[in-house]
Image: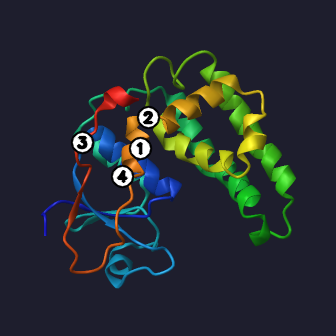
Amino acid sequence: MTGLPVLYSFRRCPYAIRARLALSGSGQKVELREILLRDKPAEFLAVSPSATVPCLADGPAVLDESLDIMLWALARNDPAGWLDMPDAGHALIADADGPFKMALDRTKYATRYPDEDPEVNRARAHEFLHRLDGRLGGNPWLFGAKPALADFAILPFVRQFAFIDKARFDAEDWPGLHRWLAAFLGSDLFAKVMAKYPVWHNGDAPITFPVPAISLSGL
């Protein structure tokens, strides 16, 4: 046991990605437990009320929502000032987590929603992405020259949507959005939070995350 908070994660899950981004950006160390969603360990199910990732256990306290984990980490240390964000950023996150994510799922996993038209949902997702592109303009981040919480709360889901059909996504006239996503995908921070770890089993040697310390200069 490390005595650190425990993060149950799944590498490709966008919710887990954004939690790891905030943990990395804050430098808050946790014990990382990578799980398989198709074979959830009993220890995880005993902790997570929703049985979904990410889930952070800090002693008796359990955070079962990715945005709560982001805020928890950044409240402890926010060296790049991600929390210095206007109210419009929180509204964008709410729209990303609500209507955009709903449209994303119904585009990416169309067979799960036989009564939904994936092209109608793609168009709904495009409305949100067009708004993001307009907000970015010529800026590198949503609110100007430096990143904020909204950037890293939303980017994992934009990435997920883009790779449904990357060629089609790339063909859209969204210069700011394309630049924003490309910078994120090419950053040291993204590379480090997407590092592969072995699936955790009870009794395995603990893995500390983030390690080594993340340098924010790679953003």
Closer to the observer: label 3 or label 4?
A: 3
Q: Is residue 110 left or right of residue 184?
A: right
What residue is pinned by disc 3? 27
Q: Earlier in the sequence, mark 3 or mark 4?
A: 3
Q: Quadrant of residue 66?
A: bottom left
Q: Is residue 152 left or right of residue 163?
A: left
- Decide: marks 3, 4 in contact (CB < 8 A)? no
User: Whole-percent x and y of residue 145?
Assistant: 46, 17
How packed mark 2 is, by other alpha carbons closer than 10 Å (few <14, some 14-19, many 20 or more), is: some
Can residue 209 be seen?
Answer: yes
Q: Which disc is residue 191 wearing?
A: 1
Name the residue located 69 percent from the left edge and 36 percent from the top edge: 129
- Decide: marks 1, 3 in contact (CB < 8 A)? no
Q: Which disc is residue 207 wearing?
A: none
What residue is pinned by disc 4? 69
User: Whole-percent x and y of residue 72?
Assistant: 31, 48
In the picture, the quarter occupied by the C terminus is top left
Name the residue located 74 percent from the left edge and 49 percent from the top edge: 165
Q: Which disc is residue 187 wearing?
A: 2
- Decide: marks 2, 3 in contact (CB < 8 A)? no
Q: CA distance from mark 2 to mark 4?
A: 22 Å
User: Whole-percent x and y of residue 90?
Assistant: 51, 37
Q: Secondary structure at mark 4?
A: helix
| Rendered position, 48 above or below 19 | below
Taking depth in this image into account, of 204 and 60 the one nearest to the observer is 204
Taking depth in this image into account, of 23 and 183 the one nearest to the observer is 183
